[in-house]
Image: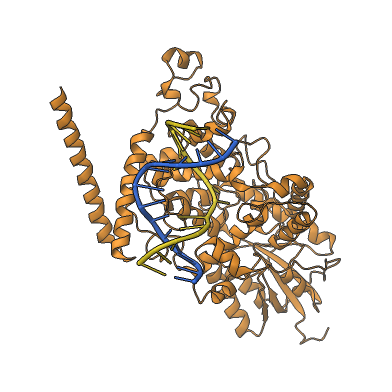
Chain colours: A orange, B yellow, C blue
Amino acid sequence: MGSNSKSNALMWFRKGLRIHDNPALHHACEGSAHLYPVFVLDPYYLEPDPTSSSPGSARSGLNRIQFMLESLVDLDSSLRSLGSRLLVVKGDPADVIIRLLKLKEWNIGKLCFEFDTEPYSQVRDSKVKDFATISGIEVFSPVSHTLFNPAEIIQKNGGKPPLTYQSFVKLAGQPLSPLSQTLTSLPPVGNVGDAETLSVPTIEELGYRDIQEEFSPFRGGESEALKRLKESLKDKVWVANFEKPKGDPSAFLKPATTVLSPYLKFGCLSSRYFYQCLKDVYNNVKRHTSPPVSLAGQLLWREFFYTVAYGTPNFDQMRENRICKQIPWDDDEELLAAWREARTGYPWIDAIMVQLQKWGWMHHLARHSVACFLTRGDLFIHWERGRDVFERLLVDSDWAINNGNWLWLSCSSFFYQYNRIYSPTTFGKKYDPNGNYIRHFVPILKDMPKEYIYEPWTAPLRVQTKANCIIGRDYPKPVVAHDSASKECRRKMGAAYALNHTMDGSVGEEDLRSLRRKLEEDATHDFKSRSQKQKLIH
DNA sequence: GACAGGTTGCGAAA
DNA sequence: TTTCGCAACCTGTC
């Protein structure tokens, strides 16, 4: 190669931790003498945070950190089998990439990375892109994390994202196919020089010592993703008849869904490849389910939330969010902690929260149960608080999808039927009358007879004694009474909706404060009039 | 302005 | 196992 021909490429991995269907990687290889595959470890994301209520960093639970490290190990080994390897560098991602682009030894002429729609990533990437552009480095940043380009769909809809699934699907049409070529070899890594590259660290090397005894049963990486995909698709009848709302949230030995979400989150699995595989199955069976409930429909839900999230400023908060109802949520640290730490006294809710802590994954309907309970169903706590807990602990936590679902479940956007409240007792009972799910994740209740396991506070004392679980001592009493709490939530939601309707989307801080006052006054008044009646009766 | 339709509520009644 | 009342929400479309 000539001395001034900058024919080396830097492939920046962030999400998209895969070899298959990776257009940025393909482009990075084309005409490159050397290829530098880089992943930047961000200390802010990884550093142990002893003040957090469960193991992990401030931003991520240990399960997701572990999943990411496994994905990196797998990526490195795949790169090695193609004659390359993964260069791991520590530091602030944008700063690190800019530093590497400046290195004389690397002599980078082309920077390739997958386009990322998240606000955090947009800021980070434009910093790097700006530097590359003024330095005369070619930048290639294709959309390949999603089936569609969110920007295109928003444009097709006149500049605003569609706010219903149906209108989204109509607008979106057919997704693009995955790349058909597979890479058989990669250009070699050139002289690394002063870049201070590492190999993928272990969880212990990151400073984590006390690894919990039960942890996520899902291993990270592209190989694992493709294996899991193949396994899921083997049962063609199951794939063809899949209907999301009918799954069993209490199934944990064999989950009722594919559990491919963590792999989609990190891009270990290409959504476009997944979609194509599903189409192949559908083409080979007589009858199959359709969106929104089908498996392919689930991938379209992902697209829907990515699109709305990309086109909605302040999507991850209530304030200044065009599509979010303004609701006077309570701020109760005690109740929030009880929910987060699985001590609400409702075994179904607590078991789900334990599964979140231990596995970093729960069934979709289980997520609904606890999200509804925290917000509009029982505790009336701000959905942003619950969102934070999920965002940190879920192995599959995905910015657009997580925020979208919290908006949905709290009846702040997309879904508005706030009278439909999940029961923290009977909902789980429908699927698991014996309470096996509770017995596994809340073992203190393992000997509670099934008649009482969903409402252990109703068990006679002799039953509690026999089960070695005294309610109020070994396991908490319910933090709220569901009947009255949910009634109260309905009342508040009704008042908040009325206010949002009257003010036509311009509810401000002061309006919420006065609504909160009014709601409290009404509650006190009701209480007093009830007491009056009681006095009259007696 | 009316109307149709909305992945996933509950509990009672048939 | 399906259907209904509950009380009445929203967006997209005409």
Where residue A25 sits in the image (x, y, percent)?
74, 69
Where residue A50 sits in the image (x, y, percent)?
50, 45
* Whether residue A237 can be seen here: yes
Q: Residue at x 38, y 47 (%)?
A: A381
* Whether residue A480 can be seen here: no
Q: Nearer the viewer, residue A135 or A179?
A: A179
Q: On the rendered structure, is A61 left or right of A270?
A: left
Q: Residue at x 23, y 45 (%)?
A: A520
Q: On the rendered structure, is A20 left or right of A43?
A: right
Residue A526 higher or lower than A476, as above or below: below
Q: Nearer the viewer, residue A23 or A172?
A: A172
Q: How many marks?
A: 0
Where residue A276 sits in the image (x, y, percent)?
75, 61
Residue A110 higher or lower than A196, as above or below: below
Quadrant for the N terminus of chain A in the image: bottom right
Residue A83 higher or lower than A515, as above or below: below
Where residue A108 sits in the image (x, y, percent)?
71, 78
The image quarter containing residue A441 is: top right
Q: Nearer the viewer, residue A452 or A513?
A: A452
Q: Residue at x 18, y 41 (%)?
A: A525
Q: Nearer the viewer, residue A8 or A492?
A: A492
Q: On the rendered structure, is A32 left or right of A458?
A: right
The image quarter containing residue A507 is: bottom left
Q: Residue at x 25, y 54 (%)?
A: A515
Quadrant for the C terminus of chain A in the image: top left
